[in-house]
Amino acid sequence: MAHDHDHNAPAPMVEEVSDFEALEIAVRELAIEKGLFSAEDHRRFTEFAEHIGPTPAARMVAKAWLDPEYKKHCLTDAIAASKAVGVDWLNPTGFGTPSDYTDLRVLEDTPTMHHVVVCTLCSCYPRPILGFQPEWYRTPNYRRRLVRWPRQVLAEFGLSLPAEVEIRVEDSNQKCRFIVMPVRPAGTEGWTEDQLTEIVTRDCLIGVALPKPGVTSNIPLPVHRAAKPAHH
Amino acid sequence: MSQHDRTHHAKIATGKGDPQCFKGTADGPPKFKVGDRVRIKHLPDIFYTRCQVYTRGAVGEVAVVTHESPAPEDESFGHVDHSEWFYIVRFKQRDLWPEYPEAFANDTLQTEFSERWLEAA
Amino acid sequence: MAALEKMHAPAEMAECAANWTPVPLLEDIKENGRVWGELADQYGVTNPDPPWKTSLDGMCEALAAGSCSSVAAAEKRWLAGEVDRGGLDAALPLLERRWEEDELSATLYQDVPFPERQLLSLVHSMIKRGLVNEDDLKKRISEVQTRLSAT
């Protein structure tokens, strides 16, 4: 997002209005006129969508790794603990959003237990602290397969765990929302909160990856077409 | 009815959140506690449910007593005058899926139910 | 244990849910609309999402906020015998919308990338439930395009 005020060329922009863009505007206008929702609500939720991202959740984990008291707070009252990373789950309405509710739980991994989160019903996700779901999380392919073949699905993400490690799938089907607190990896001794935050990627917070020194981005999965799930 | 529902919800929930706004509204204390063995009932699905079919009839253990809230079966219709306790129930994967490998006998799955779906096992 | 196919939706829900037949207006957009991937490549824009994505997400959230009351209102009319089962479908709760999106994403809109697919599925569900009229929508799209290209 360049905002140069000198003689450099402005950031490129798409110069045409696509049919999709026109469709979104048109259906929104008609919906507001019909009273399906108010313009005010739409504006509020759009601003919410523009401001959320995964950094607060990453920072929550980094802080917890560095401070045992804060870690306890995360495990007993994650909604309150969210404030320390700048997230107020009551936003933007004063009582939360209709999809995210206000009951966050942190799932603590141990050396013998690894958590991974899914919502089989629809793709519920802790958006206020983690941002939007990746596309793969929304697909029936992930939702239907993770609960039944978790080790196969995790292997597709490049994560294989020995049999002695219990894999615990959390199917978030009600109002609770979950993030995974991975085990702090070796090789991070003496790191700052910022350095630790960088390696806790969104994929680690869902549970399909483990944090590693030097790895600061999510797994680049090719975007699959949503196909009927394979039956093994 | 529509505007009243939304204004009412805003009134009771602002500053508290949802499900916090339903605290204290269940008929009594939770029927089950952490560690209790429970079975997921086979209740008829009317219009709307959040109880996954793959859990019906399965036996697990209460892992967490989470909160009070109207059950989604009622809440989606705006019937929010009755709350239930909610529980995260943990199952062994091999109790959910017949072909789950014995090699991974420690693997578990947990998910959340309102009290109406649970009976002592 | 239960069959994988019946992960969630009870049979009645699938039957009385939105009609799966194509909507001509949306088929036209599907065939002829330019998706963000194409546009971004052409104009050299690196943003992974189209500019309307957050507005779409805002709309889904705003609809969810309204849906509880509309389901209740629809159920009241159905119980009173004022509408048939189809009238009950006029409301659009979150789960139904997502399951329709799943189904439509695997069928009619399977070749459409995300998030265009999410947009088409949402509008499809709304049209089938009578929340938005296809002709009104067609007219409004045309007005919007005129409005936005005016210099």
Image (tube, coloured by chain):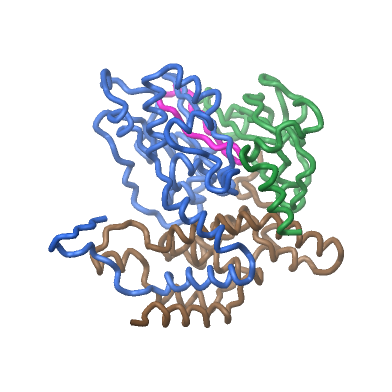
Chain colours: A blue, B green, C brown
Q: Is residue B1 above or below residue B50?
A: below
Q: Taking the image as drawn, is residue A69 in sight?
A: yes
* Residue A221 at x, y percent in the picture: 34, 47
Magenta range is A162-182
Observer-nearest of B105 and A105: A105
Observer-nearest residue: B91 or A62? A62
C80 displayed left or right of A126: right
**Residue A151 placed where, x, y %?**
45, 34
Q: Residue at x 58, y 78 (%)?
A: C134
Vertical placement of residue A163 versus A145, above or below: above
Q: Magenta segment: does it hold C14?
A: no
Closer-to-camera residue (C20/A7): A7
Residue B77, compared with residue A65, is above or below; it is below
> At which x and y percent is residue A53?
40, 44
Whether A174 is among the magenta residues is: yes
Is residue B103 in view?
no
Q: How many marks?
A: 0
The outermost residue toward the right is: C80
Quarter of the image containing the N terminus of chain A? bottom left
Q: Is B3 on the left or on the right of A101, as rendered?
A: right
Residue C141: where, in percent of width, then height?
48, 78
Is C125 situated above or below A77?
below
Q: Is residue B44 left or right of residue A227?
A: right
Q: Residue at x 62, y 46 (%)?
A: C7
